[in-house]
Image: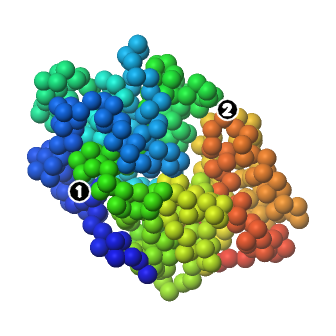
Amino acid sequence: MATAAIQNYSPILTAGVTGTVYSGSVESLADYQAKGGYDGYKRALQEQTPDDVLALVKEANIRGRGGAGFPAGVKWGFIPRNRNLPHYVCVNADESEPGTFSNRPILEQRPHLLLEGAALAAYATLAETVYIYIRKEYYEGVRQTQRAIDDAYAAGLLGRNILGTGFNLDIHVHTGAGAYICGEETALIESLEGKRGYPRLRPPFPAVQGLYNCPTVINNVETLAIVAEVARRGGDWFKSLGTEKSPGMTVYSISGHVRKPGNYELPLGVTMRELIYEHAGGIRDGNKFKAVFPGGSSVPMLFEDELDVVMDFDGPRQYGTFLGSTGIIVMDETVCLVWAALNLMHFYWDESCGQCTPCREGTGWMHKILKRLEHGQGVQHDVDLLLDICKNIVGRSICALGEFSTGSLVRTIPRFRDEFQAHVDQQGCPFEKKYTEFR
């Protein structure tokens, strides 16, 4: 059962958020300030140095919510403490991974929370320009974020000599063109520069040579929203939530075969079983649970006997998977895992930038094998060949997309090998399809 701390938790990052932006629940500047919004930012500019803000973020141990869980304060600390070159902050709002939609309510309904966090990041890293890179399909997120920026300028919270402190800051919204690869931080930088979204070789890292070859910090939307709350409430408050090594809260995006799909903001440390059965209402239509992606479609699956895993940055690792983007995709017993893998492989094959041979060719090869398994053309060695390709993709590309493409297979085939083999033996899919056949 869930602990009292989790049961009694009230959302903070998504406070006041309703199911849809069109219900009129967008938080205005006045509403945000009435709740203490921008107080941490004003205090930082008027009473603290950039090093003080950096120390606060480090002490709170805010781990990045974009997938890797890298400490935000450590990342900021890599930025040179001089102004020999312009410094930049880039907000990664290119939330494009299947099953992931936790940034959307912040962009659409609480944009000032993001702006405050981004402004604090800029102050701490000696930057005077922020770019918020939002995925093309988040039209309302773009509109509401730009509206919030305009209001912040009008209120003197952005621009020149903010609050008479001498600090200058400009924030711009940049809309992506629909490429998943631009969620990778160096591909995002390339896109901002007007180039094709190709990930860069590292080193040099963005903190040294990022946007326009200048020091750059890239953070996720949720990470910066947390920074704003920590600046207002303090590091001790933040560390009182979650677990010792994974403090704070996160927004779990739950989709798939559950009764109540949606975003659930909770302290880190809740179990997968609690998320599915207590918060998302359990498996729909009275069916049995089969498998779940714990962190978006890019991470290996978890299975029935692993549902008591603690969903923080360390818990899923014991099963060879990751918290990732906290996009939880639940599948019931009616799902054909070959068909599911085929759908996802089509996505990764299509979204590969083509720069690295293992990713470019490997995703296409796996898609071809899965398609022939699903359509009754599989041969005996196909299942082993899939695992062999997975093994040879991992660690052999510039970015992680190649490895991400193996998430639906690396743990799934060993656990459900009979299901994959049945597609060979029966010359086709043994499952009755209740959904549109994949092309």
Residue 387, label in figure: none
Please identify the quarter of the rendering in which residue 424 is found: bottom right
Where is 56 relative to 207, above or below?
below
Q: Quadrant of the N terminus?
A: bottom left
Number of other residues with Cα within 10 Å of mark 1, as a class: few under 14, some 14 to 19, many 20 or more: few
Residue 169 position in % (x across, y down): 26, 26
Number of other residues with Cα within 10 Å of mark 2, as a class: few under 14, some 14 to 19, many 20 or more: few
| Pointer 1 residue | 22
Residue drawn at x 17%, y 24% as measured from the top left: 165
Q: Mark 1 belongs to which amino acid?
A: Tyr
Q: Quadrant of the C terminus?
A: bottom right
Residue drawn at x 73%, y 76% as measured from the top left: 430
Where is 186 relative to 409, above or below?
above
Where is 42 relative to 425, above or below?
above
Total numbered labels? 2
Residue 178 position in % (x across, y down): 48, 40
Numbered disc in front, either 1 or 2: 2
Please identify the quarter of the rendering in which residue 370 is found: bottom right
Distance from disc 1 to disc 2, alpha carbons, whole Å, reads: 40 Å
Residue 59 position in % (x across, y down): 38, 45
Compare residues 58 and 431 and report the one nearer the observer: 58
Mark 1 residue element: helix
